[in-house]
Amino acid sequence: MKYKPENSEPADAATRRAVRPVICYPTDNLPLPNVDIYAEARHHLKQVDEIIVEPRDAETFHVPAGHFCRIVSVEGPQVGDLNLWNAADINERFFSGKTRALNGTHVSTGDRLWSNLPYMRPMATITHDTLDWYGWDEYGGGVHDVIGTRCDPYTNRLLNGGEYHYCCHSNLSRALATEKQIAVTDAEAHVHDVLNVFMCTGFTQDTHQYFMKASPVRPGDFLEIFAEIDLLGGLSTCPGGDCSTIHSSDTAKCYPLKVEVYRPTQGLPVDWQPAAKNPYSRNHGFDE
């Protein structure tokens, strides 16, 4: 719902609107990944693990630092909701908001996936994206967004009534609870805003509302990331399937997704190190 303005425009309204925008977080000084190293390493990969995520479910998986991970479409168009945690400390997790602020609303090859405060370091770098050809469509839609939070049973209860237990939030909560052998209510607190893998989204031009449309993903497509630290991942196969019509129900046609983990047999420098935690002192203005 959008409200109509209650106040008339001031005389200088056009002047105020005409002010040119500036980028909130210029990235000129942001350390860039060494893409040549990744490009060389990804040509020498040995698969070490494979996980199938069944429709309307989620699984966890481990990606050691210095390894590659691919999320693969295997049977039909399917969107996946991805969570990432520090494998040694799940209090450190993927920070979609800061990733969006630094990279933009959608991510692809060369973009880094950042962790939350106070850690704020690159958890992973996207090294290959078979859907990078899509770009932006006529509606302003793009693929692999860090806009949407994840479908969840609480919003569904408010909008539609009733209980539905296979939203991505619930799927990820169950998967993490199983992985860590903790209560699902404790695991839920660690589930966070996702990277919407393969999802095609944007904002409507009139009301600027978040929209989704049929994903362009097809079997064989994949998104590949390089683990900058030891990662615990969680992937949910969204109940919306390709997210062309509806989610948070059993209505849409859904397919499994596959997770593949690879170890590079050569290509990484012998002195390669996982990403270090953010060096900010955490003084916050005290004891200066």
Image (cartoon, rainbow, N blue to C red):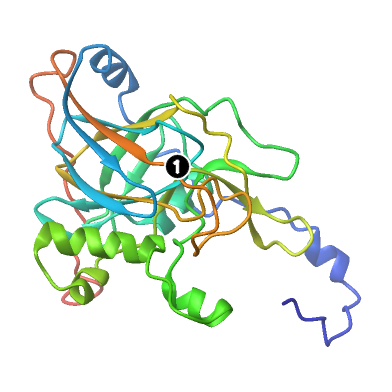
> In which quadrant will I find the C terminus?
bottom left
Q: Is residue 145 above or below residue 217?
A: below
Label 1 Cα crowd, 10 Å radius (few <14 / some 14-19 / many 20+): few
Residue labelled with disc 1: 27
Query: Number of labelled discs?
Result: 1
Residue closest to the eye, 227 or 260:
260
In the image, 200 versus 214, the foreground residue is: 214
The structure residue drawn at horizontal position 15% and vertical position 36%, both measured from the top left corner, is: 65
- The residue drawn where x is 32% and y is 60% is 171
Is residue 110 or residue 239 the one in the foreground? 239
Q: In which image quadrant can residue 45 be found?
A: top left
Q: Amino acid at mark 1?
A: Thr
The percent position of residue 222, horizontal first and vertical second, equals 41, 29
Residue under the point 52% across and 33% down: 217
Under circle 1, the secondary element is loop
Left or right: residue 102 versus residue 18 is left
Q: Quadrant of residue 267?
A: top left
238 sits to left or right of 284: right
Q: In the rendering, at what x and y percent does residue 280 appear? A: 22, 58
Q: Is residue 39 visible?
A: yes
Residue located farthest toward the bottom when viewing the structure as drawn: 6
Residue 92 spot, x, y in % from top left: 20, 58
Residue 128 to residue 31: above or below = above
Q: Quadrant of residue 214?
A: top right
Q: Is residue 281 visible?
A: no
Q: Is 254 left or right of 114, judged from the image as shown? A: right
- Give the camera-side residue of 207 and 164: 164
- Name the image quarter holding the N terminus: bottom right
